[in-house]
Image: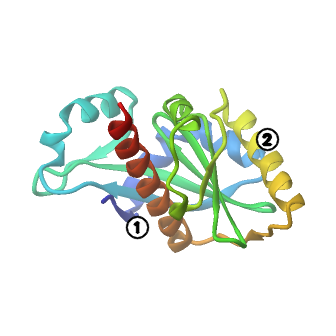
Amino acid sequence: MTEYIEISDPTLQSRVMARYGAEIAILQAAGFRHLACKLERLGPFSAVLRLPVVCLMHRAREVLLFPFPLRVAAAYPLLVHSEPSSIADCMGMGVKFYSSFSDNSILISSTLESHAALQTAIRDPKFQVVRNPPRRSPVEAWQSHKWRIGERQAQGLTVRKISSFADYVEISQRDELDLKACMTLFDMTS
């Protein structure tokens, strides 16, 4: 499982903010504000075991680190929106939006084209993840996310306040488990 670490090193934070400046500006124009910079660190020897992925990440100009022993770690900015309560995660492949609801479900919207296949995937209901179809731009994905929040509120759900790094980690871990479950179920049906 991915390890999520809040970045406190100002030099690394500056690299992240410079790399994702355009995405951050778009999100700030939509009312988001800076939450934190995070480091996603994979397990030992992941830099070797996932070399093709590392090459793609490098090509996408992601901010990469290689801590001992041969791990790959990528640094990204997180932004938060107060109303509706949401967290935005900027990555080299696109932007993800997360919101959490009173029934413990989470809504995820993104610009990640790879998530289009997840729309027809068999879902494991224990993770309570609702995925919006991916959109072309962060602005379109955010508009779709807000619309879907309104739809869920009309069904009687309330949006839980999420505004901390710990909130992000909890939601992101559920997202990761749901993605792994989808891939496992997909492999079993292929």
Q: Secondary structure at mark 2?
A: helix
For residue 81, side relative to residue 182 (left or right): right
User: Dot 2 surroundings within 10 Å: few (below 14), some, or many (20 or more)?
Assistant: some
Q: Is residue 105 above or below residue 20?
A: below
For residue 73, side relative to residue 122 (left or right): left
- Identify which residue is drawn at 26% across, 29% down: 55
Q: Secondary structure at mark 1?
A: loop
Locate residue 70, reporting x and y percent: 12, 50
- Badges 1 and 2: C-beta atoms under 8 Å apart? no
In whole angstroms, how far apart are the C-alphas of marks 1 and 2? Answer: 31 Å
Locate residue 136, reporting x and y percent: 65, 26
Disc 1 marks a residue whose amino acid type is: Ser
User: Dot 1 surroundings within 10 Å: few (below 14), some, or many (20 or more)?
Assistant: few
Q: Is residue 52 above or below residue 20?
A: above
Q: Is 29 or 114 nearer to us in this picture?
A: 114
The numbered dot on residue 8 is 1
Disc 2 marks a residue whose amino acid type is: Gln
- Identify which residue is drawn at 55% across, 56% down: 78
- Name the quadrant containing residue 47: top left
Locate residue 171, reporting x and y percent: 53, 64
Locate residue 145, reporting x and y percent: 74, 46
Give the residue pinned by disc 2.
Answer: 143
